[in-house]
Image (tube, helix red, strand yellow):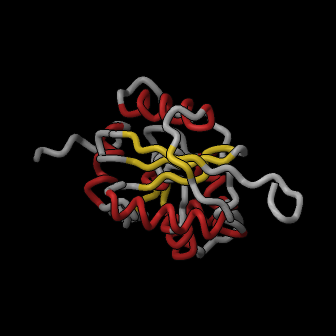
Amino acid sequence: MDSHGQDEQRVVWAVVGTDIGPLMLAATRDGLVNVVFHASDAVRGRALERLAARLGSEPVEDPDSPLLSEAISQLRAYFAGRRHDFDLPLDWSLISGFNRQVLRELASGVPYGTVVGYGDLAGRVGQPGGAQAVGAAMGANPLPVVVPCHRVVESGGGIGGFGGGLETKRKLLALEGVLPEPLF
């Protein structure tokens, strides 16, 4: 209990190796709250500081936590090509407003192996002409891979940007059969 008589928010984290490099996963009792690309010591340290500040609790490394075990299992199955969607409780507390609306639509409405344009996604949430705002929402996504911002591309056929880097986006799209495997 904290000084206000509230149960302290428990935040657990672990790093899982994947085909796109190490991912840091963090979860609360409400669900998976954060996925961080390229989870080197420095990147992980900054992410943990941000989580502590935003959630009011010091994250604890606990790879065996029941809060994380299913997420780790599903991510491993996804990268092995055995899972095409995620069935995980998600804690949306790190994102709000328009960004949350866009990310929820992305999570539920853009299935494995498909892509959507930034403008098309804006239209789906009632904001035609909001392609740039959708781009900003993708950049703010606290749950990449699980909430598949890699599936959002430019309407003219370009790959668009990606917080995890364009090579990572290409690998994820290749895994899903949208792009050919990179030659090198």
Give the total number of marks visible in the rendering: 0
Judge whether residue 32 can be spotted in this image. yes
Q: Position of residue 176 (x, y in %)?
A: 38, 37
Task: Classify 69 as above or below 180.
Answer: above
Residue 111: x and y in percent read 53, 40
131 vs 92, left or right, is: left
Observer-nearest of 99 and 157: 99
131 up-or-down from 77: above or below: below
Residue drawn at x 38%, y 55% is 37
Name which residue lies at 48% across and 28% down: 73
Residue 181 versus residue 31: which sits nearer the camera? 31
In the image, farthest residue toward the right: 5
User: Residue 113, how many percent across, how many down?
Assistant: 43, 38
Task: Look at the image and tell me in which quarter the N terminus lies.
Answer: bottom right
Residue farthest toward the top in the current orientation of the protein: 82
Q: Closest to the observer: 149 or 31?
A: 31
Location of residue 175 (image quadrant): top left
- Between residue 90 and residue 118, name the one nearer to us: 90
Image side of residue 8 versus residue 116, left or right: right
Indicate the position of residue 69 as horizontal and vertical percent values. 54, 31
Q: Toward which corner of the image does residue 167 lie, by quadrant?
A: bottom left
Q: Is residue 119 visible?
A: no
Residue at image point 85% right, 57% down: 6
The residue under the point 45% across, 35% down is 75
